[in-house]
Amino acid sequence: MKNKEQSMLLIRQLLENIGEDVSRAGLVDTPKRCINMYEELLSKTGVDPKDEINTFFESDNDEPILVKDIQFYSLCEHHMIPFYGVCHIAYVPNNKKITGLSKLARLVESASRRLQIQEDMTMMIASALEETLNPKGVYVLIEAEHMCMAMRGIKKIGTKTVTSKKTGIFLKDIDLVRDIEYKIKL
């Protein structure tokens, strides 16, 4: 964070503006804790998530590779409160090029640590895979609950938003898409 002290003063001012006593025991260190939290949750702001895909292997496998249920937390750019859920990533290797499975989880982690909307996160992950692996196709599906819908506004707890991005072979082969979607539900 560029100016941590100034940011802590802003949090303190916010607390005072809503009528809190910033000298009470429970709030004395809140500005510092709050800024530390935002530093962690937004730690990948300005970082290109595709940089996480930096290890490559060869494989004769030409079938889809699916890593599912990759948990994440991110922050809505409209309200700065969390949305969280799971990301499922499938890709079909091209020219024997694959990456380590943990790199896909790292990709999701990197993509999630910033202010954004879920739709952009979905596209960011798919684009990173396209650029680094040049696969025959990518399918990214994210299911998330948004606290801006659960805690405020409409107050619909448990509502899930599902976004997806398909490229290449996943745009043409409906049976392949159905197979991946079936495996996600398992």
Image (cartoon, rainbow, N blue to C red):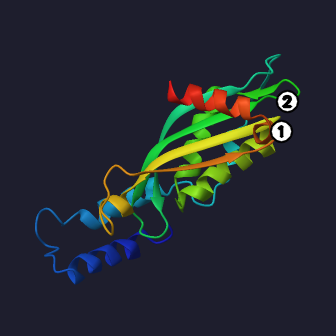
Q: Quadrant of residue 118?
A: bottom right
Instruction: Residue 89: give x, y in percent of width and height.
Output: 63, 36
Residue at (31% x, 53% y) in the render: 157
The residue lying toward the viewer, choosing from 49 and 40, is: 49
| Residue bearing the label numbered 1 | 134
Q: Horizontal and vertical percent for residue 95?
A: 89, 27
Looking at the picture, does residue 134 appear above or below residue 49?
above
Q: Secondary structure at mark 2?
A: loop
Q: Across the whole image, how many numbered discs are drawn on residues?
A: 2
Q: Among all residues in the image, which is located at the extreme left?
A: 24
Which residue is located at x 45 percent, y 44 percent? 85
Q: Is residue 39 above or below residue 98?
A: below
Residue 25 picture quarter: bottom left
Task: Look at label 1 and name its amino acid.
Answer: Asn
Precedes in sequence: disc 1 or disc 2: 2
Q: Residue at x 59, y 57 (%)?
A: 119
Q: Which residue is mark 2?
A: 94
| Of the pair 128 and 7, the residue shown nearer to us | 128
**Residue type highlighted by circle 2:** Asn
- From the viewer's perspective, is 4 left or right of 121? left
Residue sitting farthest toward the bottom: 17
66 w.r.t. 24: above or below: above
Residue 17 in the image: x percent, y percent?
23, 83
Quarter where residue 81 is shown: bottom left
Asked if the residue under mark 2 is in contact with the one under mark 1, i.e. CB atoms within 8 Å, the reply is yes
